[in-house]
Image: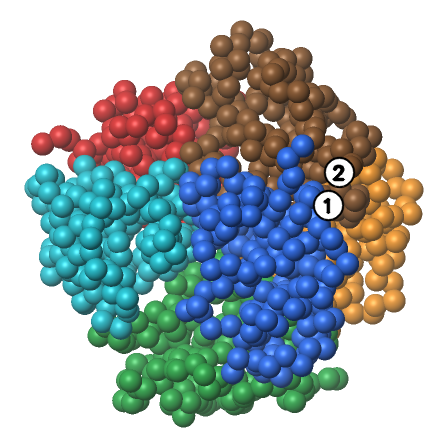
Chain colours: A cyan, B red, C orange, D brown, E blue, F green
Amino acid sequence: METKIAVFAGTFDPITLGHVDIINRSLRLVDKMIIAIGVNTKKQTLFSLEDRMAWIQEIFKDEPKIEVDNYTDLTVNYCRSKGAKYIMRGLRNGSDFDYEAHIAQVNKELAPEIETLFTISSPELSYISSTIVRDLILYGGDYSNFVPNSVAISKAKRNF
Amino acid sequence: METKIAVFAGTFDPITLGHVDIINRSLRLVDKMIIAIGVNTKKQTLFSLEDRMAWIQEIFKDEPKIEVDNYTDLTVNYCRSKGAKYIMRGLRNGSDFDYEAHIAQVNKELAPEIETLFTISSPELSYISSTIVRDLILYGGDYSNFVPNSVAISKAKRNF
Amino acid sequence: METKIAVFAGTFDPITLGHVDIINRSLRLVDKMIIAIGVNTKKQTLFSLEDRMAWIQEIFKDEPKIEVDNYTDLTVNYCRSKGAKYIMRGLRNGSDFDYEAHIAQVNKELAPEIETLFTISSPELSYISSTIVRDLILYGGDYSNFVPNSVAISKAKRNF
Amino acid sequence: METKIAVFAGTFDPITLGHVDIINRSLRLVDKMIIAIGVNTKKQTLFSLEDRMAWIQEIFKDEPKIEVDNYTDLTVNYCRSKGAKYIMRGLRNGSDFDYEAHIAQVNKELAPEIETLFTISSPELSYISSTIVRDLILYGGDYSNFVPNSVAISKAKRNF
Amino acid sequence: METKIAVFAGTFDPITLGHVDIINRSLRLVDKMIIAIGVNTKKQTLFSLEDRMAWIQEIFKDEPKIEVDNYTDLTVNYCRSKGAKYIMRGLRNGSDFDYEAHIAQVNKELAPEIETLFTISSPELSYISSTIVRDLILYGGDYSNFVPNSVAISKAKRNF
Amino acid sequence: METKIAVFAGTFDPITLGHVDIINRSLRLVDKMIIAIGVNTKKQTLFSLEDRMAWIQEIFKDEPKIEVDNYTDLTVNYCRSKGAKYIMRGLRNGSDFDYEAHIAQVNKELAPEIETLFTISSPELSYISSTIVRDLILYGGDYSNFVPNSVAISKAKRNF
């Protein structure tokens, strides 16, 4: 039987409890899940790629199905290079939906053999986003309830 | 390895090309998919349960992974009785999302071990719904582009 | 040059100031506009077809481009029978949009030569709907600010 | 200083933990809150008016600011009869918003001196609705996590 | 009885008739309302903080319940420093809602004792935003119908 | 009879098959349609104004009703200078709607004699946008299915 490989792509600047929830809920469905940090050299991030990768590796270090990686290509091209037939995404609300539907349909046109699958965020985590965590960091707010423990206690140098 | 069983539940009054698209796109992901007609004795349907089941069986007769069934219980109870850990759903637009998110979250509360997974409808099929097909039937419109061939040519007696 | 004929279809139970706004704003664009009451024998209305037609005729009696009619067929079939190439619709909010987009796409599939055009309701009228007027009537509320004068002063017998 | 009176109106068929959350969060803001069951003789409810009132009275029996009542009139007329200048509402998602905005604007037109105020549901309760509780009851599902304890243990006779 | 203090926060670049409407409608509910300009040193504004504060002070100079201020901290921290238990917000449409719900839920998590309250914009003002006023200014359009008189006639130097 | 002139304004960076679909569907309704590139000196585009104009001229070179132009003014001022009484727009989804409704209402306030008309994108083109085409270009993806042939084969120099 074909090995089912999925890609969960994002910027993860930083990874949040919302991401972890989506990953854990979809993990059972596949044989391997690649958490892939999309690197866009034009987009400034708050945390370095090294920190972002290290956090994800630490969080899932006991989960053999998970591989952590990064890529600079189009997401569908990256999926093809890894043999992944599934893109996993989380949906938080109706505004997310319109955006995600656009991306999923473009990816379907570019790579018809790759399917995008969605789960809906747990309601108590649905308001968490990396953007809000970064805003809290910038204003000195307490973001420890929004991120995994390894991120919360990190001494990572920020890019600013 | 655990057999992955999914339920795709609906009224299918009648099954449309939109349903078939969602089923075909999610089928690869699972070992078995049960297309399950939810029977609600208080809700009048246009077509009999027998016709609705026969159409689905005919459409997927060459697909060994698919089983066609019907149920009267809560969907999550039905899933448990069949050993299904996944509910498959299709999303067409932002209004669908708010409704589907409600149902998915209630099901998660009732049965935390069952995950709801969504795919987004192909855009050229996203405007098709059983409601619109029934309206076309009632007004004598041509609905053959909206349903599988076996439904279009059917001589099914309608419940009215 | 081709005569441009548009259909503005609805139940108009009763016609509101929201409808009148949309009609007046789109009228300039066409040579003839048919305000067409869709008659659905299964759907109970509050006012009789005769009253609903009489009100619309009274409101637009000085507008030579407007014709008032009723029909029982599919809307696109009715348009074809009248030589109308345009369906005019009003949009009030994002929820309206998803519903209207579905209908417009089905009509496009059924009759590719007929185009649906939309205007957005004037904001101060965007909360008016026939449903709300009917609710006000049923509870004895004052609805005179929501309907044209001829409806407000009418002694029409209601169907209940 | 003027006594601030608010009305929280609904069908409460039955009252849910979502309602209780909204009430508790807005209570501090006002001097008196009237939880008012809107009675519509044309709309069949699952539970009797007596049961629905008794549950709410039981839940808030230690809260002196709360009064439980019922009414058959338009909501704004009822507010006026009680001297209430505020209508309290809860919002769960974007679809709720469009509906609630319509109602609030009609009420503003009918009674400019009455203001509608909204709070947003706690995310972990945002998927709970009376409709979903009634569906669970009808299908024999466990709804005890969705309603206050007094409703969950009730032996109320249902209207069916 | 506790003094009820609310914060209405924003950038007010410039204040519009939409803001004034929301402030006037919520004012009656509280004992004191602080209109607080959030200062973000990384975000370039069109008008200086001094002009923006002066306009608001001029508009509400006869309203003893209103205080005008500015802050650089997280909004909830600012509220705590002022003893404010309420954040007042206006909602214009369903897209606003998803954004505002996120912010409100984060604020609830950070400061559970502070409640966010919403009113819905008057429909005839719902399309006005500071962004649109700034665009009109940049293109030389007439924005006098969108802002209070003191802003419209101002000779304020713009930051560009 | 008055000549009906419409403006279809945009940045067209680059023009897509989605734009072409909307233009073709609305063309029949008017006597003349001006495809007008809005030039904003502060906004960097991927393609030069010359390339963007040349593509549109090439695509519609056999369509006598179409004129291609560019402007730097407010859209309604440009419409007035050309005698255009209609602004044509396309709508893709509910998120588009909220944005477009804002713009249309501001334009109505600024120029009450100009009407904005909308068509809904063909579903199979509804996910195409200039933004997505630019992203594909930047990442080396194949965008030939999303743009007219003259754009796809172009050797245009990009502004980066």
Image coords of residue D99 (percent x, y)? 61, 44
Residue A81: quadrant of the picture: bottom left
Of residues A9 and D45, the one drawn nearer to the viewer in this rendering: A9
Query: How far apart, in angstroms, are the residues tagged by discs 2 and 1?
Result: 10 Å
Q: Secondary structure at mark 1?
A: loop
Q: Position of residue E118 (x, y in %)?
A: 60, 46
Task: Give the class, few, some or many, for how many residues have Cα within 10 Å of label 1's Cα (few <14, many ≥20).
Answer: some
User: What's the amino acid at mark 1?
Assistant: Arg
Image quadrant occupied by the C terminus of chain D: top right
Q: Is residue D76 visible?
A: no
State the quadrant of the N terminus of chain D. Answer: top right
Residue annotated with mark 2: D85
In the rendered image, the vertical position of residue C79 relative to residue B48, given as above or below: below
Return the x and y of residue B23 as percentages of the image width and height: 30, 43
Q: Which residue is mark 1?
A: E28
Tell me: residue A19, above or below residue D6. Answer: below
Judge left or right: residue B89 versus residue E98: left
Question: Are dots 2 and 1 in contact, CB under 8 Å?
Answer: yes
